[in-house]
Image (cartoon, grey):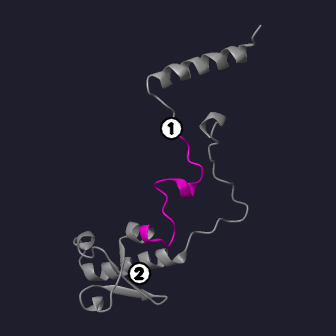
């Protein structure tokens, strides 16, 4: 005689089969953070685009607000629109540019010693 747990497992398998027969599949879980489609690596071109930074070309200083740090010169992709409501948009754009360049060049944040690990769901055996 099957135990209660075995009966429930059979029912779950039966329901899963019915859903899959109708084209409904559970979402696959990502293997690692870096395999996710929305992963952005620190210091990469995608990270720079996410922050709205552009590497400045020589001569951009005449046309754009630029900031140089660690031998690299950057400018904002859009230095006008986000700051139009401020009394001195140029000053705010300089501050924001400096902050974004600092974040970009700082690298990934360090995990403090003794910090609990993040929860990562384990894929089921049939999803591998």
Q: Is 88 placed above or below 81 here?
A: below
Residue that appears at 32% across and 77% down: 76
Q: Is 121 placed above or below 116 here?
A: above
Q: In what element is the residue under mark 1?
A: loop
**Percent from the top left, x then y, of residue 75?**
34, 81
As rendered, which of 122 and 69 lies closer to the eye? 122
**Neighbour class for label 2 at 10 Å: few (<14), some, many (≥20)?**
some
Please give the count of numbered marks on the rendered protein.
Answer: 2
Q: Which residues are magenta?
A: 28-46
**Percent from the top left, x then y, of residue 74?**
38, 82
Residue furthest top in the image: 1
Residue furthest right in the image: 1
- Residue linked to disc 1: 27
Q: Quadrant of the N terminus?
A: top right
- Residue linked to disc 2: 98
Q: Quadrant of residue 98?
A: bottom left
């Amino acid at each position: 005689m099957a135990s209660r747990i075995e009966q429930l497992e059979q029912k779950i398998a039966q329901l899963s089969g019915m859903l899959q027969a109708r084209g409904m599949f559970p979402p696959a879980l990502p293997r690692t953070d870096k395999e996710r489609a929305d992963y952005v690596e620190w210091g990469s071109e995608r990270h720079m685009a996410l922050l709205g930074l552009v590497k400045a070309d020589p001569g951009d200083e005449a046309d754009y607000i630029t900031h140089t740090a660690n031998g690299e010169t950057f400018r904002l992709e859009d230095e006008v629109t986000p700051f139009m409501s401020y009394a001195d948009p140029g000053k705010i754009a300089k501050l924001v540019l400096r902050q974004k360049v600092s974040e970009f060049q700082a690298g990934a944040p360090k995990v403090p010693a003794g910090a609990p690990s993040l929860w990562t769901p384990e894929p089921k055996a049939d999803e591998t």
